[in-house]
Image (cartoon, rainbow, N blue to C red):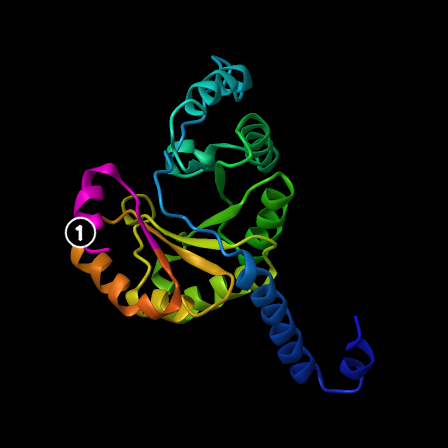
Amino acid sequence: MQCVRVWRSVSPVCRAAHSTLWRRAQSHKATATSRLDLSGIYPPIATPFTAKEDVDYQRLEDNLQKYAKIPFKGLVVQGSNGEYPYLTEEERVEVVRRVRRSLPAEKLVMAGSGCESTRATVQLTEKMAAAGADAALVVTPCFYKGKMDSRALIQHFTKVADSSPVPVVLYSVPANTGLELPVDAVVHLSQHPNILGLKDSGGDITRIGLIVHKTQSQDFQVLAGSAGFLMAAYCVG
């Protein structure tokens, strides 16, 4: 990189700041010309298992052949329906790889890459991108939910988005995590050039409408995370 010699002459704090700004600039260049349009339906597919609790890749392939015939915009892989907490990292990546290989190229793959630590999420997001994911669906870390305030979550998602080779979609699913991504954090993160949108599975239509309103100038895309409130979500944009 051209800036390496300059960075060596500045303090570690300035170097870190310049590094972050450089990554954001590169991210902005990538997304400015190729920003994904997420509008459409993305079924959160299940992960089939054998009687021995291994991933049943043959059944997965069979399911994918059926999904490919339905005019979905794409698939959500390793969302909560995919039971990702029960898979090893290798299994999570392999499932995404097989989904991408089986689907037509025009169908998007949104792959869950969220982990409890920022470092692990960054690493898994990179692996999901290498496996063919078009976007990374990053759930809120929640084991220490009492400490996951807006400041902590903004820092977490910003670091993930700074490093991600693909656009990031925030994922708020309070029924499973016990934690709802705060509206002020969503609004702040919507300004990041590599954060594409939010999948909100909380079902609070007032909240969804507020987020749509507060982020309308940011080209930020909001997805309803359940069919139960899909029509209502359409009504608020």
Residue 21 at what x, y percent from top left?
61, 76
Residue 17 at what x, y percent from top left?
62, 79
Q: For mark 1, what is the residue?
A: 235
Residue 196 at what x, y percent from top left?
44, 57
Residue occupying the point 56% across, 60% down: 33
Residue found at the far top of this picture? 51
Residue found at the far right of this picture? 5
In the image, residue 231 lies in the stretch drawn in magenta = yes
Residue 156 at what x, y percent from top left?
49, 63
Residue occupying the point 74% across, 87% down: 10
Q: Quadrant of the C terminus?
A: bottom left
Tell me which segment is drawn in magenta: 222-237
Q: Indicate the amino acid at tag 1.
A: Cys
Q: Nearer the viewer, residue 213 or 118?
A: 213
Q: Quadrant of residue 222?
A: bottom left
Horizontal side of residue 206 vs 131, given as left or right: left
Q: Quadrant of residue 236?
A: bottom left
Q: Nearer the viewer, residue 94 or 119?
A: 94
Residue occupying the point 65% across, 73% down: 22
The answer to whether residue 55 is seen in the rendering is yes
Q: Label 1: few (<14), some or many (≥20) within 10 Å?
A: few
Above-or-below relation of 156 to 7: above
Horizontal side of residue 30 vs 226, given as left or right: right
Q: Nearer the viewer, residue 125 or 72?
A: 72
The answer to whether residue 114 is seen in the rendering is no
Asked which secondary structure carries label 1, the reply is: helix
